[in-house]
Image: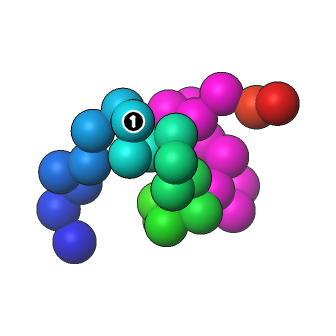
Amino acid sequence: MAQALTIEELLLLPATVDLPNGGQGVRHRPD
């Protein structure tokens, strides 16, 4: 899929992003 998600969507749906870290990548700040 093309990553056409906004920052808000990435913050709300971090698990939907295909990342090797399991969702918490560089785009999503860790807790």
Q: Main secondary structure of the magenta part?
A: loop
Residue 17 horizontal/vertical position (percent): 47, 60
Q: Which residues are magenta?
A: 19-29
The quarter of the rendered structure image containing the C terminus is top right
Q: How is the image coloured?
A: rainbow
**Where on the picture, by quarter, is residue 22?**
bottom right
Q: Is residue 31 left or right of residue 3?
A: right
Q: Is residue 1 left or right of residue 16?
A: left
Q: Is residue 22 above or below residue 29?
A: below
**Where on the picture, by quarter, is residue 21?**
bottom right
Task: Choose between 20 and 29: the one closer to the eye.
Answer: 29
Furthest toward the bottom, the residue is 1
- Asked whether residue 3 appears in the rendered view, the answer is yes
Furthest toward the right, the residue is 31
Look at 51% across and 56% down and name the residue there: 13
Look at 49% across and 66% down and name the residue there: 16
Q: Is residue 2 above or below residue 10?
A: below
Amino acid type of the residue tagged 1 in the rendering? Glu
Mark 1 surroundings: few (<14), some (14-19) or many (≥20) residues within 10 A = few
Residue at label 1?
Answer: 8
Residue 1 horizontal/vertical position (percent): 22, 72
Total labels drawn:
1
Residue 12 horizontal/vertical position (percent): 52, 48
Q: Is residue 10 above or below residue 29?
A: below
Task: Choose between 10 and 3: the one closer to the eye.
Answer: 10
Look at 60% across and 42% down and name the residue there: 25
Kindly state the secondary structure of the residue where label 1 is placed: helix
Magenta stretch holds residue 28: yes
